[in-house]
Image (cartoon, rainbow, N blue to C red):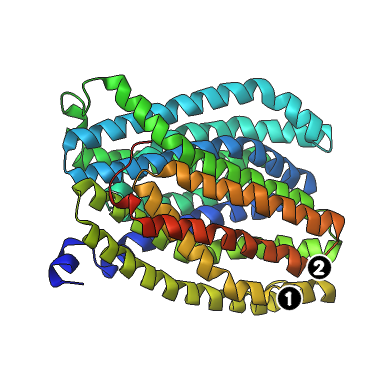
Amino acid sequence: MTQATENTTPSTARIFQIAWPLALRAVIMFSAVLIDLYFVSSLGEEAVAAIGLSGAIAGLLMGIVFAFSNAAQVKLAQAVGTENPLAIKTALVNGFIINIVLAGIGIATLLILARPIVDFIAHSPKVAALAMTYMRIFFIMIAAEAVGLIFGSFFNGDGRTKIPFYSFLIAFPLNILATYVLVFGHFGMPELGVAGAAWGTALAAIVRLLVLAAVFWSSDRALIKLPGWIDADRWMSLREQVRFAWPIAATFISMNFAANTCTLIYANMNIHQFAAMTLIMPWVRIAGLISYSWAQATGILMAQLLGKTVSSEALDAFLLRARRAIVVLAVIVSLTYVGIVFATQRIYVDLDAQTRTALFSFLPVLLIIPFPRALNALCGNVLRAAGDTHYSMRVHVGAQWLILVPVTAVFVLLFDLPAVWVFAVYLLEEATKFIPFHQRIRSGSWHHVQHN
């Protein structure tokens, strides 16, 4: 690698500067859900079931909005790389339009269809009523996030990932305080129960939106005032962004469906095996954010480089540095998993011995899986940065529905295998994705922005 090539691409330290706010923001998001459930759990199983039910339904819409926001982030990063303000403005406004339309259609649809779905699934009329109450307030959060996520994508795409992180850092304590006060009715406020948890989440989302909008207005509002668009046909650019975004959205939606399907399959295991799977999965997700955030940060910077049309040599050199670093992070994640498994003895002190044995049986898989998962995430983010969204989607969706779900079903429903074999299917899924992802990267087809 020549010195000139090193100077034309971001350093490893620059990737870290972008990655750590992404990781901490994701941890805060995940922790907020756990804290809300912690407060509501004191209201009884029906309240917890109501939040779980409404969250599963409305969460699908939120996931769609979030997925299209990720796609907008890639487009914005590419536009930043071109250093063309009109390209940035076009990607930003298109992102707002797509998210607002999606949120509006989704909320209207759920207002019509959610009630019969909830009545059919809910364990009792009380659970159904609580779920609908929570969901109607949750729609406020979705509306606020539909706009706020695009502001966040703009700052992330520009490499200013600290700004969205700080917005979460500001809103997170408010979420905890508002949920605590409104659920239980402290400090003279009404005792709203489940509705209080929803209002706490909605208020936090509104505050995040206001913080991001205020920062944008103070530093970047000149973009909106620019006359014209990057394309002569204004709506053609919107259609192009939708074509770019839908495979990314489809990937995340498929991932969500596959995960929920696997959870339903796990429910057929014996109680100890199922409990072990249920307990380990959130910890696996949180620790995995370390390497995934690095992959996402690499994707942002790669999109900027592709927008600048730097040389293939420079792109390969940057990817090589990012790959070496993510292997080191995978080692850290692997060791973290070991620590988590041993820590479960203190975190879950009342676990049955059979459940604890099942948790320890996961160790061999947990030691190995961070490596292919991290490298696959890196490849996927690089390909999406280059606009190769259809290929990335096919690899992910194919592995989920041809490997993960059917093999899990066979292992659980047909052979009734121990939890360690069921958990190992995730390793098989990552191994399935490894070859096609790395073949695509080696082909060099991603060295130029592609238009699907």
- Report the residue at 52% width, 32% height from top: 140
- How many neighbours does mark 2 have within 10 angstroms: few (below 14), some (14-19), or many (20 or more)? some
- The answer to whether the residue labelled 2 contacts the one labelled 1, judged by CB atoms less than 8 Å apart, is yes
Q: Which label's residue is closer to the chain start, 2 or 1?
A: 1
Q: How many marks?
A: 2
Q: Position of residue 387 (x, y in %)?
A: 36, 43
Residue identified by numbered label 1: 361
How many residues crowd mark 1 within 10 Å: few (<14), some (14–19), many (20+)?
some
**Residue 161 in the image: x percent, y percent?**
32, 54
Q: CA distance from mark 2 to mark 1?
A: 9 Å
What mark, if any, has residue 202 been given in the picture?
Answer: none
Location of residue 209 with respect to 442 vertically, above or below: above
Task: Pick whichever, 1 or 178, lies toward us.
Answer: 1
| Circle 1: residue type | Ser
Q: Quadrant of the C terminus?
A: top left
Q: Nearer the viewer, residue 172 or 241?
A: 241
Residue 429, horizontal then vertical, whole percent: 62, 59
Task: Specify the quadrant of the image occupied by residue 50.
Answer: top right
Residue ID at (60%, 38%): 60
| Residue appearing at x 35%, y 48% in the figure | 385
> What residue is disc 2 on?
418
Q: Position of residue 449 (x, y in %)?
A: 29, 44
Helix, strand or loop under label 2: loop
Regarding residue 208, the answer to whether it shows in the image is yes
**Is residue 191 at all visible to an observer of this figure?**
no
Q: At numbered mark 1, what does the secondary structure look like: helix, strand or loop?
A: helix
**Relative to 95, residue 276 above or below:** below
Three-letter code, disc 2: Pro
